[in-house]
Amino acid sequence: MPTVQGAIPHHIAIVMDGNGRWATRRFLPRLAGHRQGVESLRRCVHACVQRGVGVLTVFAFSSENWNRPADEVSGLMDLLAKALTREVPQLARDGVQVHFVGEKSGISAQVREGLQRAEAATASNQRLVLNVCFNYGGRWDITQAAAALAARGEPITEASLHAAMGMAHVPDPDLLIRTGGERRISNFLLWQAAYTELYFSDRLWPDFDEAALDEAIADFAARERRFGQTSDQVQAQQPGSLRA
Ligand code: IPE
Ligand code: IPE
Ligand code: MG
């Protein structure tokens, strides 16, 4: 584990990509990759709890993933519903509070109820907030927030938009990891990632283990976040700095 104080990002977001390729390379059906992806997520959640990460946000199903073959879509839905039910006791033991972020319409009643039950059963847990972005798209989130404000006749400001979006209950991500080798956002947290540090790993999501997570965290710890300021300004604000 990195030893630098403050080096652990408070909020990590992950585009869990590469399940399909993981399976195809083993001559397995793509769904076998998604199943392995759930195992990887379980390991990652536990690792984040152990490392003192406060919020973990994962991209599980995008607005555009409906365009996949029907059997893959239904397989993914089924997998999620089952995993949620199965994992609740362990999530509770780990102190994980689950939130579902995404468009609820369009999801089957079975999956929606599973998500709601997981949220209700973990609502009082305090160690880690786990946001599961499901039927989620950054554009959808911005649009639904603007539409909600307009419907209520409220002014559109940065603060009001932020408050109407799906991630209003947590601070913006500090570190966004994408596995699977692609260097793109794919409609993930478009608004919230304005100043997030991006980290791309060539590992496929099922292979992304604790050591890979620690590498990402160490990479993050070595960066200087400037938020538009100069490096000199940032360094002057560091605790223990002699510079005014
Ligand atoms: C990511 O893995 C999981 C979901 C999109 C649900 P993919 O299924 O996109 O895996 P690849 O990119 O085809 O390997
Ligand atoms: C992004 O992965 C969505 C999730 C991981 C849920 P995709 O595999 O759908 O992204 P593209 O299509 O390669 O951009
Ligand atoms: Mg993919």
Image (spheres, grey):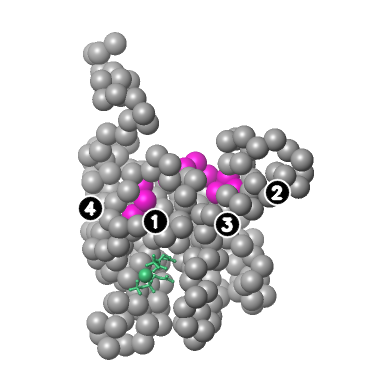
The residue pinned by badge 2 equals: 148
State the quadrant of the C terminus: top left
- Dot 2 crowding, Cα within 10 Å, few <14, some 14–19, many 20+: some
For marks 4 and 3, the one nearer the N-term is 3
- The answer to whether residue 86 is seen in the rendering is no
Q: Which mark is residue 185?
A: 1
The one nearer the camera, 48 or 181, is 181
Cβ atoms at labels 2 and 3 below 8 Å apart: no
The one nearer the camera, 172 or 139, is 139
* Tag 3 secondary structure: helix
The amino acid beneath tag 1 is Ile
Q: CA distance from mark 2 to mark 1?
A: 25 Å
The residue pinned by badge 4 equals: 215
Residue at point 50%, 68% (across, down): 64
Residue 228 in magenta stretch: no
The residue pinned by badge 3 equals: 140
The amino acid beneath tag 4 is Glu
The amino acid beneath tag 3 is Trp
The amino acid beneath tag 2 is Ala
The magenta stretch is 165-177
* Tag 4 secondary structure: helix
